[in-house]
Image: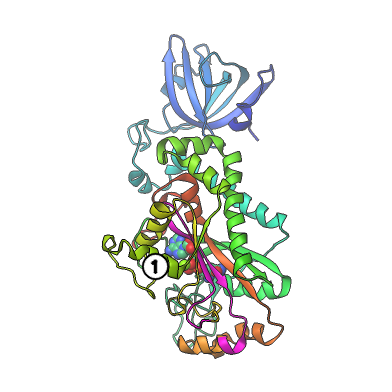
Amino acid sequence: MADRIQKLLQQKPDANSITVKGWVRTRRDTGSFSFLEINDGSCLSNLQVIVDGSLSNYEEEVTKLSAGCSVVVTGVLQDSPAKGQTVELHAATVTVLGWADPETYPLQKKRHTLEFLRSISHLRPRTNALGAVTRVRSRLTIAVNRFFQERDFIQVHTPIITTSDCEGAGEMFQVSAAGEKKDAPFFGSPAGLTVSGQLQAEVYALALGNVYTFGPTFRAENSNTSRHLAEFWMIEPEMAFCDLACNMELATDLLKFVLQDVLENCTEDLALCNKFIEKGLLQKLQDVVDKDFVHLTYSAAVEELQKVNDDFEYPVEWGIDLQSEHERYLTEKVYKCPVIVTDYPASIKPFYMRVSDDGKTVAAMDILVPGIGEIVGGSQREERLDVLEKRMNDAGIDTKEYDWYLDLRRYGTVPHAGFGLGFERLVQFATGMSNIREVIPFPRTPGFAPC
Ligand code: 4AD
Ligand code: MG
């Protein structure tokens, strides 16, 4: 394996020959030298390579290198006199692996808009911004797994193909075999892509205690917004012997933990985001780590929102589902920090949420953050068989199809709770990207799924 630039930039110069493999970002010639900026994706920084005109392929090849060409360089690391870098590579050999015709290569030195980059999703990870986002996303994945590992949660891989519609919103993509007959479905009954791994995570929580699932989920909702994807990843912990309070505590700790982790481990990439993507990003993230979240019931949120009802496209009254404009008003204007809204009306929430003693609300919680709105949705689950059956009947759900789910309440039922953290919304929040299409490698939205 070649040496990675991220490591090399932290090394002291020595006389050993090293090998670097990467892509040319720029070339500049002065006198009898060429200066190449090479990037290999391991970090934001490029490595400066100095190529002496005496190299055998200097005229033929080195002076023809342009952005996007792939090269292998061997040489020796030396102290760099240039500002902002500690070492530079003095090349002994430069081998060109692949050319990139400057007439047609779309990524020239000028800054491109994120919209344009979306139209070339196969090339955009080669840019500074998308490279940074991709590394932060990767680090967040590691941080999520570390968080649960440190707390002895067991990871469960819930299915992608399922026959249950967890959210009951009728937003499932259907799955069928090519040429399948309607009366003889491949799986025996109609199946779809999962909208959430929660119901299956509950099965495992009621056997293993504390579990989490972290996988792709799919929703055929026709919302072309900057916060919705048709395919997105979700982190869903589920805990036995846990109520709403313990659920909120875990969600708060998780958000603080993963943001703290990227603040420590993605300093260079987040500094870029802070400069070019969202001014004040680092302070925003540090505040979330350091400060308490506001807790508020749905009823109190409605009262707060009604004070400025005229400002909203959708006026607020008790019983409505909060819209993004309401969520953002609370977290951005009123409290200026993450807000946990609890105790939503039962009528607007799915069947599995635990009905409270007032009979009108459920033990639900959403976490709202500035710039995004809802980032977490969760609840304590209905563990009482009779209440759950009634809720399902009221919602028009065939209880026979969910007999397995009801069995969890028939045999050794316990209070339990969990939530879903939208992973792309988390990456959006951490990087300051205003459009969710920028934080997933290959976004899928209505009318759009290239590659
Ligand atoms: O609030 P939601 O729909 O909750 C559930 O699916 C529960 N079954 C989770 C659970 O309790 N285990 O979705 C959870 C989160 C949202 O808060 C949001 O962050 C994200 O998933 N989300 C989306 N992200 C991107 N695109 C979409 N279309 C999303 N829909 C939800
Ligand atoms: Mg929700």
Picture coordinates of residue 364, whole percent (x, y)? 52, 71
User: Where 107 falls versus 146 (above or below)?
Assistant: above
- The residue lying toward the viewer, choosing from 200 and 260, is 260
Q: Is residue 422 visible?
A: yes
* Callout 1 secondary element: helix
| Residue displayed at 49% across by 12% down | 53
Q: Is residue 43 visible?
A: no
Picture coordinates of residue 406, whole percent (x, y)? 61, 85
User: Where 311 falls versus 71 (above or below)?
Assistant: below
Picture coordinates of residue 161, whole percent (x, y)? 54, 72
| Residue displayed at 61% across by 64% down | 213
Q: Is residue 296 magenta?
A: no
| Residue displayed at 41% across by 38% down | 279
Amino acid type of the residue that numbered disc 1 sits on in the rendered structure: Val
Q: Which residue is mark 1?
A: 302
Residue 68 is drawn in which quadrant? top left
- The residue lying toward the viewer, choosing from 379 and 440, is 379
Along the horizontal axis of the image, is 308 left or right of 47? left
**Which quadrant of the figure contains the C terminus?**
bottom left
User: Where 233 falls versus 80 (above or below)?
Assistant: below
**Part of the protein shown in magenta:** 358-387
Picture coordinates of residue 447, whole percent (x, y)? 33, 62
- The residue lying toward the viewer, choosing from 399 and 77, is 399
